[in-house]
Amino acid sequence: MSICLMSYNVHGGVGLDGERNYARIGRLFDRHDVDIALVQEFECRPSRGGSLKDVDDLRGGHFENVATGATMREEGGWYGNMILSRFPIVGPAIHDISIGRREKRNILDARIKTPRHGVIRVLNTHFGLSFAERVQQSLKVLHIVEKEHDDGLPMILAGDINEWRPYAGIIRTLNQILRNVPCGGTFPTALPRVHLDRIWCMPGNLIESAAPLRTPETSKLSDHLPIIARVPG
């Protein structure tokens, strides 16, 4: 049995039609039988029109397990990264990769107990907007991955890297120890030529295929297309 993984910058739950609706993103996960979802830009702060009910709307009846990586909080809600899983999540950790006074950023690092592959380490992140910021963040990711590399677990790193140049130093840094899985353009959804969202794995054959999911529905749910990837059974 293969594992279906999706990485998705959900744009705060607000689609290009202006509607804020996490339930329809949850239904997308369900229809595509997603086993593990890596979500960036999850927003449920009341000051931005959200509530903690948004978490349940996104989960639907599909995901039993949730790990959250807030980068900003207020009473009754938060903003940041999330991992949803149909399989148990063991000991999630949050690594701060914020740079100076730039917007807070982190890596949500979870170990997921899958039925066929055992424990897979899954890292979900969203890099910053400035080039200098992303350079430092890529080095931090490399350090985090190398530091715990000796545990020998299969690993997936995915998210909105905010880097479109395939030969940028940021990409080369991460390619040193992880396989960069070819995906394709994800941004903007109207003409997705820019490769902002990316996925890496170790060992190199862990992921069989990965590609943006471009449908009439995903073309309006966010300003990014999701990446859908398969881990063969």
Image (spheres, grey):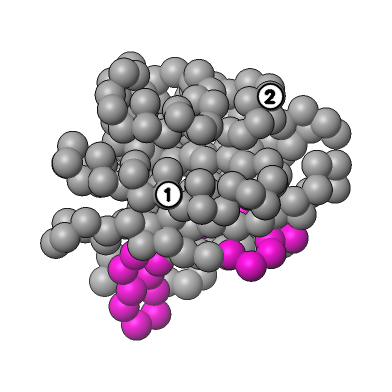
The correct choice, above or below, for 167 with respect to 217 in the image is above
In the rendering, at what x and y percent does residue 62 appear?
A: 70, 53
Q: Amino acid at mark 2?
A: Asn
Q: Amino acid at mark 1?
A: His
142 part of magenta stretch: no
In the rendering, at what x and y percent does residue 216 appear?
A: 48, 24
**Dot 2 or dot 1, earlier in sequence:** 1
Packing grade of label 2 (10 A; few <14, some 14-19, many >=20) is few
| Residue tagged 2 | 205
In the rendering, at what x and y percent does residue 47 appear?
A: 26, 71
- Any part of residue 45 in sight: no
Packing grade of label 1 (10 A; few <14, some 14-19, many >=20) is few
Find out whether the residues at labels 2 and 1 contact each other: C-beta distance under 8 Å. Answer: no
**Range drawn in magenta:** 70-92
- Circle on res. 38: none
In the rendering, at what x and y percent does residue 105 appear?
A: 32, 57
Q: Nearer the viewer, mark 2 or mark 1?
A: 1
Q: Secondary structure at mark 2?
A: loop
